[in-house]
Image (cartoon, helix red, strand yellow):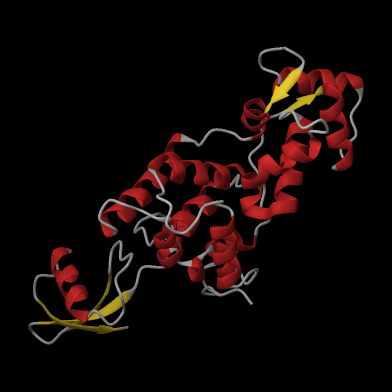
């Protein structure tokens, strides 16, 4: 069952819309992108290396025209010779008759749009602040809020399933450092699978507790608390960018409220 307010039709519509990858305008490439998402879901583009290896019959880490044609056929995408001419021009950027791994990935995965890149960097900055500048995969696993991932809110997956998918696609050990470029690369792959800006924004904001967003893309994971004011009034407030703040750390939450401008806060309690 959809875990969202029935009155919020815009959010419900966003959560239940089919996942569609970004399009490039070449029908065969777009069909291949759709196949990647249908097979691997939101994290499907993290598996491009595996797709390349499955097509690479001679193991030279490059695809000949025949290997690409055969690989597409195995994926249920038959091609004519004219269509293969178009595909080779698209993938084979140096026109040497071979598609390298870089050309294959570059031809399939669109660049991260600037506004999405800015959002991802904001999340990385928040993580870096919370973790004191060094981010390890174990830290990402601990702080990643799978319970507020859009696929969980839509009732499509459980939090443990989303957590496992998130960690398994990094191909790293828990103690490995995650750099800014690593983080951008991960979300570049996720972005390729998502045509919807609102869905991408909601995903990033919710799993990393990044305050902001408008309409259906607005963050819904940051915790609300009841603030008791000096005059006895009680108001509901949202803890902004509350990544890593535990629910029972009322002293820190009270300090955060004052930092947010609620200077007359006397006490806080969970909403």
For this rendering, which residue is in front, 188 or 175?
175
- Image x and y of residue 231, in percent: 8, 84
- 86 with respect to 159 (left or right): right
Q: How many marks?
A: 0
- 210 with respect to 94 (left or right): left
- Image x and y of residue 241, in percent: 30, 61
The residue furthest top is 95
- 191 with respect to 184 (left or right): right
Residue at 65 percent across and 68 percent down: it is 156
Residue 183 position (above or below residue 156): above
Residue 88: name its quadrant: top right
Residue 90: name its quadrant: top right
Residue at 54 percent across and 54 percent down: it is 199
Residue at 37 percent across and 51 percent down: it is 123
Residue at 32 percent across and 83 percent down: it is 271
For this rendering, which residue is in front, 172 or 114?
172
Residue 204 position (above or below residue 72): below
- Image x and y of residue 97, in percent: 77, 15
- Image x and y of residue 78, in percent: 90, 34
Q: Quadrant of the N terminus?
A: bottom right
């Amino acid at each position: 069952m959809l875990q969202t307010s029935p009155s919020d039709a815009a959010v419900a519509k966003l959560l239940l819309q089919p996942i569609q990858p970004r399009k490039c305008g070449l029908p065969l490439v777009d069909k291949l992108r759709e196949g990647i998402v249908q097979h691997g879901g939101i994290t499907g583009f993290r598996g491009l290396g595996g797709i390349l290896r499955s097509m690479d019959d001679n193991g030279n880490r490059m695809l000949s025209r025949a290997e690409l044609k055969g690989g597409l056929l195995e994926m249920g995408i038959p091609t004519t010779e004219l269509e293969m001419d178009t595909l080779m021009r698209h993938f084979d950027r140096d026109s040497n008759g071979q598609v390298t791994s870089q050309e294959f990935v570059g031809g399939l995965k669109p660049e991260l749009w600037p506004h999405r890149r800015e959002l991802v960097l904001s999340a990385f900055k928040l993580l870096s602040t919370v973790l004191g500048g060094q981010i390890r995969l174990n830290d990402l696993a601990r702080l990643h809020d799978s319970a507020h991932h859009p696929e969980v809110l839509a009732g499509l997956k459980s939090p443990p399933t989303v957590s496992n998918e998130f960690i398994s696609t990094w191909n790293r050990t828990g103690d490995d450092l995650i750099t800014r470029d690593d983080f951008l690369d991960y979300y570049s792959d996720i972005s390729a699978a998502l045509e919807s800006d609102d869905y991408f924004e909601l995903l990033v904001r919710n799993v990393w507790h990044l305050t902001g967003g408008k309409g259906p893309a607005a963050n819904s994971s940051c915790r609300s608390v009841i603030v008791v004011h000096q005059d006895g009034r009680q108001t509901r407030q949202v803890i902004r960018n509350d990544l890593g703040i535990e629910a029972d750390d009322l002293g820190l939450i009270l300090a955060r409220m004052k930092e947010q401008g609620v200077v007359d806060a006397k006490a806080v309690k969970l909403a």
